Amino acid sequence: MPLIDVPGTTLFYDLTGPEGAPVMAFSNSLGTTAEMWDAQAAALSSRVRVLRYDTRGHGRSPVAAGPFTVATLADDWAGLLDALGIASAHIVGLSLGGMTAQALAIRHPGKVKSLALMATGPYLPPPENWHARAETVRRDGLGAIVDAVMPRWFTPAYFESHASRIGFYRKAFLANPPEGYALACEAIAAADLRPDLHKIAAPTLVIAGADDPVTPVSMAEDLRKAVTGADLAVVPRSSHLLAVEQPEAVTDLLVAFIERVEGAALPPVERASFEAGLGNRKAVLGVDHVQRSLEKAGAFAMPWQDFITRNAWGEIWGDPRIPWKTRSMVTLSMMVAMHREEEFKLHVRPALKNGVTVDELQSLLMQTAIYAGVPAANAAFRWVRDVLGEEADGL
């Protein structure tokens, strides 16, 4: 697992993309992890160098001792760039990540080539609400608030039609350390960046979700006015986690913005490149799994890793003619028919993340009994239970 020490803490990070390309660095929102940027990483990793990380106290980044501020988080981000030898980057942050991005541009302006601020503001009142949330989480855990948080992240239409993807973000939310989440709430409560917004000199794009109840369009407009020369874009049919709900629209906005700042078009997507395949592979199977596979490969197996990354994950999974949900269902079907238990189990959770519902998975396995045989389907039902356990009944 790629962990790196920065002054005051340790951060989990993922860096994917061609050497020498412009760097885009992404910071996650409260309660999420680096995986919230999966779609952007997969789409951009053959064109730019994509850096994402787990904010301290989130995901795989441990909870550092004592309270911290948004300024601390900005210094963490600056320390990460320094540790990786990155002089400056195009900075992208959403919600808490957007507040961190503002603070980074204020405190470390030389590190910021451009600034994309999504679903965020310079302060998020009232502070007593954040303190109350921190107290609840410390006392009762994240399960006490998850059912109130999830519907605010996504529009009702998305929430109802993407149950399995909502399940992925719910699971990730609940896996966060409660103390890390509570400390982040207190950092938000104490933050007010308004007096220093005039110091932001980097080209800035503010992006808002049209239906965001947490940081509404009016807040984004106020932020745009406060940052000299900033532009505003509103993404239709999206709530707070707009990078997840409307990934193509957000990625297109980022590409157009970065190309304007760079003064040149980004390289075209190279579907069969190692970088493109690696981005897709991490987005589907997860950063942790892919990193472990590469680390364990050694000199003998590394050419094989290169082959499957370029061809299976770059050329095939990168082919836009078939959506990832369909590819997941096809993959699972073939693994049942061929009785490939290890590979089947590897693709179960990614299939849910790609939008396959448990009902659809159940129906798929019933169909494999007709075309691949009852024993094959019987084994597959057992494999699903091995992977999901009682989750399969509750999803």
Image (spheres, helix red, strand yellow):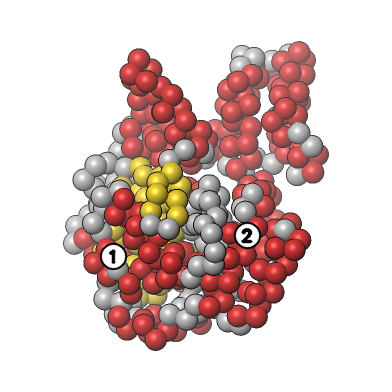
Side (left or right) of 133 relative to 272? right
Q: Residue at x 30, y 48 (%)?
A: 84
Q: Position of residue 7 (x, y in %)?
A: 38, 57
Q: Is residue 50 visible?
A: yes
Near-viewer residue (73 or 124): 73
Side (left or right) of 286 relative to 76? right
In the rendered image of this protein, does residue 249 appear above or below residue 117?
A: above
Residue 207, by quadrant, is bottom left
Q: Residue at x 51, y 33 (%)?
A: 289
In the rendered image of this protein, does residue 379 appear above or below residue 135?
A: above
SS assignment at label 2: helix
Q: Position of residue 53 (x, y in %)?
A: 44, 51
Instruction: Estimate the spatial distance between the alpha carbons at disc 1 and disc 2, rounded to whole Å.
Output: 30 Å
Q: Residue at x 63, y 74 (%)?
A: 130
SS assignment at label 1: strand
Q: Is residue 319 visible?
A: no
Name the residue that disc number 1 marks. 112
The C terminus sits in image quarter = top right
Give, as a three-letter code, the residue at label 2: Glu
Name the residue that disc number 2 marks. 179
Q: Residue at x 30, y 80 (%)?
A: 199
10 Å neighbourhood of mark 2: few (<14), some, or many (≥20)? many
